[in-house]
Image (tube, helix red, strand yellow):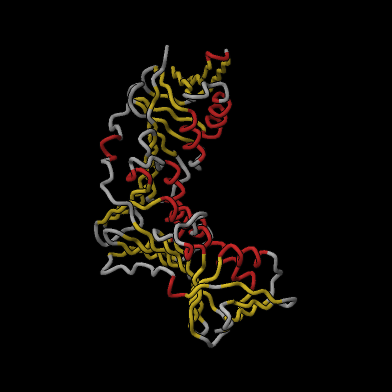
Amino acid sequence: MKFIVSSTYLLKQLQVLNGVINSNNTLPILDNFLFELNGTELKVSASDLETTMTSTLEIDSDSVGSVAVPAKLLLETLKTFPEQPLTFTVEDNNTVEISSNSGKYALAYAAGDEFPKAVSLEDPSSTIVPAEVLATAVSKTIFAAGNDDLRPVMSGVFFQFSPQGLTFVATDAHKLVKYARTDVKASQVADFIMPKKPLNILKGILATSNSDVTIEYNDSNATFSFDNYVLTCRLIDGKYPNYEAVIPKENPNKLLISRSQFFSSVRRVAIFSNKTTHQIRLKIAGTELNISAEDIDYSNKAEERLTCDYQGDDMQIGFNSRFLTEMLTNLQSDEIQLEMSLPNRAGILTPVDGLDEGETVTMLVMPVMLNN
């Protein structure tokens, strides 16, 4: 078995796949990339049993076969080469020999059939989503997903597909983000919960792709295929909480403000907040927004006044500044709207501008109790 491939082309593909490999695997075979050669097509796969990703490369060869090559060693070697063709030859003494312009390198390999097979989905439903839409949906929601092992359903992003449009939701019970598109539709109603790890890998590559992503899914697994990649992962099992029930419908108090101005004030004032609660206080009256924070233990305090466009009753409400800054970082608009009803009900952040036709982003942040 022998093939020739460009060093930088191979490195680029392997660096993407390397995101799947865990740093400490229970099965030693998972520390390898699986190379499957079939004529001029080379399929390289990486897996952690939950997620498997495959990339198909065009190479120069006429052999057939499969081997598992140590991922870390191969990546470290490839990073040091300038652009050049490399020849991989599988020798009889259980090593793969790589020949470059300047030398030869031998790596021990494992048999390809020891590598776990990727799940093939029986009779899946499928939806096609433009890469750009999926990349935006993932980056807008994933930061709000939880990290609590006791509530696994909240540790992923909830995908809801229907003929009316697509909705993506993430929450950790303190903050919630709902990203919806009515310009991209699915043929039938379906929903599933995607784990964070495969989404982070997808987010990285989708940003540079401009093709369509075919998403196939059943009750337990989902497959994303685009360009020369196929990612298959196990879904999170369980029922997603009814998020619509937590979004307050009646919000008479509406605040309009420049995002960058509000963001920099919150960041500045938050430095002076209590290090465990991160609490900041918003006091709104007329056209004035007063943002303040105090750390009584250290006698630190800060206060800023901003002008804003506000309709509603005068009110004071407390928020965790970390959640607010995360949300403001993930909004790209010039102006934002904060809707509130009562100091103990969630506030709703939405962008006022900068959205595509049919695109909506709703961010919900739970208030914290103010100690007056």
At 33% from the left and 64% from the top, the residue drawn is 216
Front residue of 30 and 142: 30
Residue 202 drawn at (x, y percent): 46, 57
- Quadrant, the N terminus: bottom right
Which residue: 39% across, 58% down?
50
Question: Among all residues in the image, which is located at the extreme bottom?
Answer: 62
Q: Is residue 31 left or right of residue 153?
A: right
In this view, the residue farthest toward the front is 93
At which x and y percent is residue 356? Answer: 43, 50
Residue 294 picture location, percent across and down: 52, 16
Left or right: residue 309 compared with residue 126? right
Measuring 28% from the left and 53% from the top, which residue is drawn there?
191
* Residue at 42% in and 50% down: 196
Q: How many marks?
A: 0
Residue 358 at least partly seen: yes
In the displayed structure, does residue 271 sit left or right of residue 153?
right
Where does the C terminus fall, quadrant-wise? top left
Is residue 227 visible in the rendered image? The answer is no
Q: Is residue 338 above or below residue 286?
A: below
- Above or below, comparing residue 359 to residue 206 in the picture: above
Which residue sits furthest right?
Answer: 102
In terms of image quadrants, where is residue 82? Answer: bottom right
Residue 5 vertical placement versus 63 (above, below): above
Residue 175 image point, x, y percent: 39, 35
